[in-house]
């Protein structure tokens, strides 16, 4: 059975940036199980996995445009630190929801914390970064009708509405 839409895929992955720094990895812990074609993985990775068989290993390079987007230098905001005083454990990389004056919701990532101000960045921390995934395909199965109607994978014996 090969990876294609509507298959449930279990794999190990190891993600590094262009400097070889490990950003994320399933090695040493549980592998990732996902529904192929449902948009749960970043686009460039999902496309590259199509057609692979169980046991396959592959190194996939994903350009920023097919991962977390290009970095947009506009939109950085500096806010007084006390405006965020209500947020517990404020730290760099944390994701915050804000609201524009027109009511539109925006997501910001904490880019830098200074003594009296905090720099907020609308870009994902991995925007502009080319990603390298080393993957190993462990299992491929058909999705159940219930999983297909929900658009995600269920664990063993898991049912919900
Ligand atoms: Zn479900």
Image (tube, helix red, strand yellow):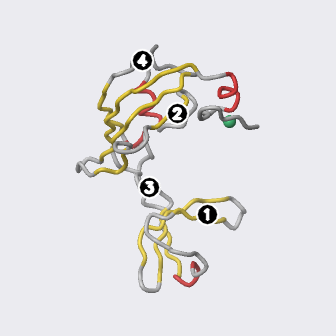
- For label 2, the SS is strand
Rounded to the nearest angstrom, the CA distance separating label 2 from label 1 is 27 Å
Query: Residue under circle 3?
Result: 72
Rounded to the nearest angstrom, the CA distance separating label 3 from label 1 is 18 Å
Query: Residue under circle 1?
Result: 97
Query: Residue under circle 2?
Result: 34
Which of the two discs, 2 and 1, sits closer to the camera? 2
Name the spot of residue 55 as percent of width and height, x first: 34, 22
Rounded to the nearest angstrom, the CA distance separating label 4 from label 2 is 15 Å
Name the spot of residue 109 as percent of width and height, x first: 49, 63
- The earlier-in-sequence mark between 4 and 2 is 2
Q: Is mark 4 within 8 Å of ligand 1?
A: no
Where 29 falls versus 113 (above or below)? above
Image quarter for ligand 1 equals top right
Which of the two discs, 4 and 2, sits closer to the camera? 2
Rounded to the nearest angstrom, the CA distance separating label 4 from label 1 is 38 Å
Query: Residue under circle 4?
Result: 51
Decide which of 150, 96 is in the foreground and name it. 150
In the rendered image, the residue lying farthest to the right is: 161
Pointers 4 and 3 in contact (CB under 8 A)? no
Q: Is residue 114 left or right of residue 157?
A: left
Give the residue displayed 69% in from the left and 67% down from the top.
Answer: 101
On residue 74, the disc is none
Name the spot of residue 15 as percent of width and height, x first: 34, 43
Where 33 falls versus 97 (above or below)? above
Name the spot of residue 79 as percent of width and height, x first: 53, 77
């Amino acid at each position: 059975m090969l990876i294609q839409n509507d298959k449930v895929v279990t794999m190990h992955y190891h993600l590094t940036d262009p400097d070889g720094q490990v950003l994320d990895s399933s090695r040493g812990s549980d592998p990732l199980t996902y529904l192929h074609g449902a948009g749960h993985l970043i686009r460039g990775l999902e496309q590259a996995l199509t057609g692979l068989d169980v046991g396959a290993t592959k190194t996939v390079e994903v350009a920023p445009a097919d991962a977390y987007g290009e970095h947009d230098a506009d939109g950085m905001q500096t806010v007084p630190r006390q405006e965020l005083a209500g947020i517990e454990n404020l730290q760099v990389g944390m994701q915050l929801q804000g609201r524009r004056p027109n009511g539109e919701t925006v997501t910001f990532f904490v880019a830098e914390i200074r003594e009296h101000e905090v720099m907020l960045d609308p870009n994902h921390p991995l925007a502009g970064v080319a990603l390298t995934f080393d993957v190993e395909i462990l299992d491929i199965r058909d999705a159940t009708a219930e999983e297909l109607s929900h658009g995600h994978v269920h664990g063993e014996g898991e049912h919900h509405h």
